[in-house]
């Protein structure tokens, strides 16, 4: 199919498709002339994946390219854990470390000790989520919310179950390629889905606890 047909079938404007091609997140089509290329169903699928990561997952295009480069790399084809780490690093790449490096380092150690000793989690120290979480906790302390870390520890067992569900989703993929893609979809779109469910749960609990207050925002 020509690029116009690719645009029609995916709903992505031609200029956007050309931009994705230039940025390397969409592989080039089969060249049929100096100014023409042919595309197939693999381009439709990749284009929809890119669009989902950018528009639903809210990921910068540079992050999308980094993840897709890893998905397509030969050395990751049998290493789901490596790809998961790549996705996590990309997701947390915009989280800035706290200005007080010593406090953040201490908080990272505290969080890891708790999750390992109390919950039995297996956590490599270079996991980017550790630093991101520590930065959040130290920032909360700066705002006078030192008790926030207690709620983090209450979240942890619940989130542990989400991790089980996430890997169940990956494990049920039909083949390795789809399994790799499931890591990307399950993490990037899953984050948005979990956030949406959290907001709905807050609304539900607020209505339950404060039944006499009209929740105008949620009507």
Image (cartoon, rainbow, N blue to C red):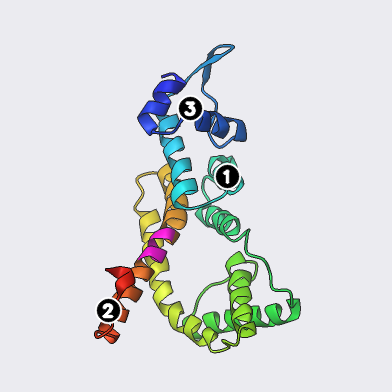
Which residue is the site of mark 3? Answer: 14
Examine the image and state in which quarter residue 149 appears: bottom right
Examine the image and state in which quarter residue 163 appears: bottom left
- Residue at far top of view: 33
The quadrant of the picture occupied by the C terminus is bottom left
CA–CA distance in space, label 1 to label 3: 17 Å
Which residue is the site of mark 2? Answer: 214
Classify residue 201 as left or right of residue 72: left
Give the x, y percent position of residue 117.
Answer: 53, 84
Q: Is the magenta region chiefly helix, strand or loop?
A: helix
- Compared with 96, 109 (above or below) is below
Q: Nearer the viewer, mark 1 or mark 3?
A: 3
Disc 3 secondary structure class: helix
Q: Residue drawn 53% across and 80% down? A: 115
Give the x, y percent position of residue 30.
Answer: 51, 19
In magenta, the rendered stretch is 192-196
CA–CA distance in space, label 2 to label 1: 41 Å
Mark 2 vs 1: CB contact within 8 A: no
CA–CA distance in space, label 3 to label 2: 47 Å
- Compared with 188, 119 (above or below) is below
- Mark closest to the chain's N terminus, 2 or 1: 1
Which residue is the site of mark 1? Answer: 61
């Amino acid at each position: 199919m020509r690029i116009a047909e690719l645009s029609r079938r995916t709903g992505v404007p031609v200029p956007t498709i050309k931009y994705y091609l230039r940025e390397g997140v969409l592989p080039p089509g089969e060249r049929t002339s100096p100014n023409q290329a042919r595309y197939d169903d693999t381009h439709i699928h990749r284009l929809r994946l890119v669009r989902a990561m950018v528009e639903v997952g809210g990921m910068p295009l540079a992050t999308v390219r980094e993840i897709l480069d890893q998905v397509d790399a030969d050395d990751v084809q049998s290493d789901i854990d490596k790809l998961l780490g790549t996705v996590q690093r990309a997701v947390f790449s915009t989280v800035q470390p706290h200005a007080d490096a010593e406090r953040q380092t201490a908080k990272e150690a505290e969080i890891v000790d708790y999750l390992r000793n109390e919950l039995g989690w297996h956590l490599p120290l270079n996991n980017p989520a550790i630093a991101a979480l520590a930065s959040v906790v130290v920032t909360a302390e700066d705002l006078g919310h030192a008790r926030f870390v207690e709620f983090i520890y209450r979240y942890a067992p619940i989130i542990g179950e989400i991790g089980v569900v996430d890997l169940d989703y990956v494990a049920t993929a039909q083949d390795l390629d789809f399994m790799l893609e499931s890591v990307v979809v399950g993490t990037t779109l899953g984050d948005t889905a979990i956030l949406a469910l959290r907001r709905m749960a807050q609304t539900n609990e607020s209505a339950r606890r404060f039944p006499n207050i009209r929740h105008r925002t949620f009507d």
